[in-house]
Amino acid sequence: MITVAVTGGIGSGKSTVSSAMAERGAVLIDSDRLAREVVAPGTPGLAAVAEAFGPHLVGADGALDRAALATVVFSDAAARRTLEGITHPLVRGRFAELRAAAATDAVIVNDIPILTSLAVAATFHLVIGVRADPDVRVGRLIQRGLTESDARARMAAQLSDDERAALCDVVLSNDGGRDELAARVDALWFERLLPFEQNVREGRRAPRGGPALAEPRSSWAADGARLAARVSAAVNGARVDHIGSTSIPGMPAKDVLDLQLTVPSLEEADELSGRLGAAGFPALPGFDQDAPHPADDDPEHWRKRMHVNADPMQSINLHVRVKDSPGWRWALLFRDWLRVDPEIAAEYLTLKRLVAKAHAGDASTAGYAEAKEPWMASVYPRGLAWAERIGWTPE
């Protein structure tokens, strides 16, 4: 199965998107409904809210006065954080119970309005954001019975669309009619979510094309951070770095994010393989070694493990390397060197363009990668000299 978060500001239409996915076969879990369940009469959650905000918020019938609580938390950021500290762990626990009860081939959609941190976003296979023009959202909220001032106050209390976008793998626009939104949901469901779920379930990589270079994308840095957090969350917080050309500002590159997971040993890497696969990063057998470079050409020192993407719309190479091994150090050193030395960056880009042109018709990137290795070996001593000269360390 895969788990998908759908998030968006109030009035954006996220619940419409979630419902549309349920119509297409998703298992829908509504966090608003769970949030009501965990503070229902007689629950530990309600007792904790009453202790934090006062017993006057509990009516004679034993139920929470949600309107009165909303008035408090939407105007006070500290109060809102206190409430979230009470309810969010309870909601996540209930979500875990419902997820465990779902079928093994399910696409589980969690309608979650208050997704505010990368740590929470990283626990899902995919995060879908829904956005709409602020005036459109205000109009929708007025139709629900809010005043314009109340609508704008509630919108201002939430993340902005730009802040939320950094947590999302895909953002759907919902400024138009239902037919437009339905077409976007269809494309996402059939072209991404269903193949993603099947790939995860079968431990299969998503198809990928040849070595075409793309112009630098402003999203690569945020994509790298978000996916590194997702990998790290799958393996109990281990170090994950964004490496490779997409981590170099302004560098044209294949639209493939290279990440490096740090492990203490290859035995540990093998133990983590199943968890990475379940998180959407299946192992790629047969790619278990980097090309040895001069100064340390013992092949055993360049061993690694390789994982890739099950998501058909986001290509990833996840290099699993042992801490302090030559390949681990070189990946970090080469990235940092390219970031600060325009001369070596230009030299590398010239090589990339020549090799990409020579392998433009290839069905895979294997030939492209192999053709770069002689140059990589030639600059390896220069990189080590640069690191020694400036006192570089991988930390």
Image (tube, rainbow, N blue to C red):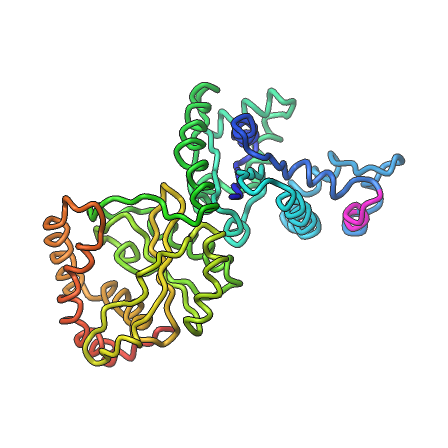
The mark total stands at 0
Q: Position of residue 190 (x, y in %)?
A: 42, 31
- Give the left or right position of residue 162, taking residue 104 as reference: left
Main SS category, magenta section: helix
Q: Left of 152 or right of it: where is 58?
A: right
Indicate the quadrant containing the C terminus: top left, top right, bottom left or bottom right: bottom left
Q: Quadrant of residue 214?
A: top left
Give how far across and how far down residue 73 sits, in percent: 68, 43
Query: Residue at the spot x=54%, y=47% of the render?
Result: 116
Q: Quadrant of residue 346?
A: bottom left
Residue sticking out furthest to the right:
60
Image coords of residue 309 (percent x, y): 38, 49
Residue 27, above or below 385: above
Provide residue 347's location: percent of width, then percent of height.
Answer: 13, 62
Residue 338 in sight from this viewpoint: yes
Does the magenta portion include 43?
yes
Magenta-drawn stretch contains 228 = no
Rendered view: 385 above or below 226: below
What's the residue at 36%, 41% (across, down)? 313
User: Quadrant of the rendered structure where residue 46 is?
Assistant: top right
**Which residue range is magenta in the image?**
42-49
Mark yes or no: residue 80 visible.
no
Q: Nearer the viewer, residue 147 or 287?
A: 287
| x 52%, y 36%: residue | 8
